[in-house]
Amino acid sequence: MRALRFLAGFAVAVASLHETWQALRAAWLDPRLERWVTAAAWVALVVASAGWAGLVVYAADRRAGRVRRRVGVYERALARGGRWP
């Protein structure tokens, strides 16, 4: 199940890279507010999905005892409790 969560986050990040690039190019060439909002939304999707995939891998490595340096953002997310990721 953890592998499936990682793959889902990674797949969303990779799949949205093309759309993100196209939105950024469109906003750069024709700088209207709605184009920049669209580009910002695509960038947020890429960052969030890549961050989620990283969190899943970090949590698995942490459970296995392979973490040498703690990552503060991930530690705060894991400290919130719950069973995720």
Image: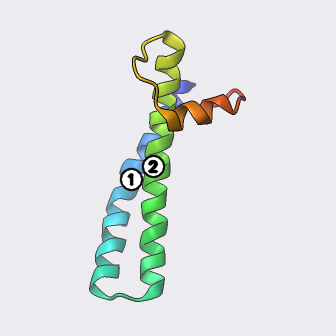
Q: Nearer the viewer, residue 52 or 8?
A: 52
**Residue count near mark 2 (Cα–Cα under 10 Å), binned few <14, some 14–19, many ≥20:** some
Q: In which quarter of the image is the C terminus?
A: top right
Residue 52 vertical placement versus 18 (above, below)? above
At 42% from the left edge and 78% from the top edge, which residue is drawn?
Answer: 36
At 51% from the left edge and 40% from the top edge, which residue is drawn?
Answer: 52
Q: Which of 58 and 17 is in front in this view?
A: 58
Query: Circles 1 and 2: CB distance less than 8 Å?
Result: yes
- Residue to which mark 2 is pinned: 12
Q: Residue furthest right?
A: 82
How much space separates mark 1 and mark 2, taking CA atoms?
A: 5 Å
Q: Does residue 85 show up?
A: no
The circle drawn on residue 39 is none
Residue 5 vertical placement versus 1 (above, below)? below
Q: At label 1, which amino acid type do we have?
A: Ala
Disc 2 on helix, strand or loop?
Answer: helix
At 46% from the left edge and 74% from the top edge, which residue is drawn?
Answer: 38
Snapshot quadrant of residue 43 = bottom left
Residue 63 vertical placement versus 2 (above, below)? above
Q: At label 2, which amino acid type do we have?
A: Val
- Residue to which mark 1 is pinned: 15
Q: Quadrant of the N terminus?
A: top right
Count of numbered circles in the view? 2
**Residue count near mark 1 (Cα–Cα under 10 Å), binned few <14, some 14–19, many ≥20:** few
Q: In this view, does 25 lie to the left or right of 47?
A: left
Return the x and y of residue 32 as percentages of the image width and height: 41, 89
Return the x and y of residue 82 as percentages of the image width and height: 72, 29
Return the x and y of residue 83 as percentages of the image width and height: 69, 26
Q: Nearer the viewer, residue 11 or 76?
A: 76
Disc 1 on helix, strand or loop?
Answer: helix
